[in-house]
Amino acid sequence: MADSREQLAEHLRFLGELGVDGFRRDRVWAGRPGERGEGRGEREEKPEVRSPEPEVRVDPVTELAAIRDDIGDCTRCKLCSLGRKQIVYGVGSPTAGLMFVGEAPGRDEDIQGIPFVGRAGQKLTQIIEAIGLKRDEVYIANVIKCRPPENRNPEPDEVDTCEPFLFRQIDTIKPRVIVALGTFAARSLLKTDAPISRLRGRVYDYRGAQLVPTFHPAYLLRNPSCRRDVWDDMKKVRSLLNGETVV
Ligand code: SF4
């Protein structure tokens, strides 16, 4: 017994030298390190470590087809009964890094069901190729999917009704850069009344992309002196696509 007391005293001195200044009576300290409470009904709650959720990206081909299905033979606004031949949805790569957005289909687009065909479309193709891309590597759409009569500007109620389809196209494709073609598209997307001459020359954050307004190719055909401005805008686009910072 005396030996045991002596051994215990020596053991306590030894623990004291290690800096252990006492014993806790808590049961969670009763086991060996790493065994606290284990097997005693007091299993330590360990925080659950979750790996970050991978971003679920819906297949853009399927989603773009689903949006087109939702549009159907749309009669949601009055343009459905004002002479349109067909809905002009969008064309190009469903995973494009660059998206062009125009105003509304014109006569040629209404006939063919494809945005930016005819002379303005050819000019747009030249612009795309000037920055080293092919037309089928970008995506092209309009704010409005049906041709307004006599090519008049779309009216506010038509824009409000139709633009959610464009937003869904943008959110599906997730382009890094969007080029707004012309006053109407730039104003509609940026929700402003400012003219294109004031809007262009700057880069805007828009729905996760960077938006560059520029002149409409049809305007460029009528005003060749704007070529320099459009080229400046497209050089910005090319820099943005290359990951460079543009102010
Ligand atoms: S413009 Fe848009 S909302 Fe109006 S009828 Fe055409 S698809 Fe529908």
Image (cartoon, rainbow, N blue to C red):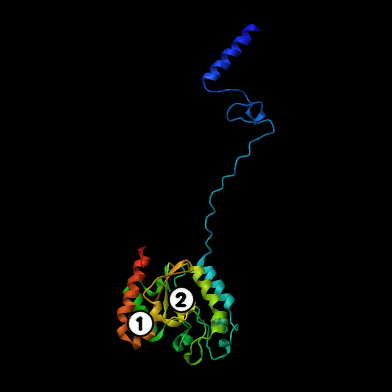
Residue position for label 2? 91
Place of residue 120 in the rendered image (x, y in percent of width and height, measured from the top left): 38, 84
Place of residue 208 in the rendered image (x, y in percent of width and height, measured from the top left): 47, 66
Q: Quick one: 41 or 21, which is closer to the camera?
A: 21
Residue 201 visible in the displayed image: yes
What SS does tag 2 mark?
A: strand
Quadrant into which the N terminus falls:
top right
What SS does tag 1 mark?
A: helix
Left of 191 or right of it: where is 41?
right
Kindly give the residue lying farthest to the right in the view shown. 41
**Circle 2 crowding by C-alpha within 10 Å: few under 14, some 14–19, many from 20:** some
Say which label, 2 or 1, has the lower sequence index: 2
The amino acid pointed to by label 1 is Lys
Kindly give the residue lying farthest to the front in the view shown. 21
Please tell me how many numbered marks the rendered image carries.
2
Kindly give the residue lying farthest to the bottom in the view shown. 150
Quadrant into which the C terminus falls:
bottom left
Camera-near label (2 vs 1) is 1
Determine which quarter of the picture holds residue 83: bottom right
The quarter of the picture showing ligand 1: bottom right
Q: In this view, does 152 lie above or below 177?
A: below
Residue drawn where x is 60% and y is 40% of the image: 46
Q: Quick one: 235 or 79, which is closer to the camera?
A: 235
Residue position for label 1? 123
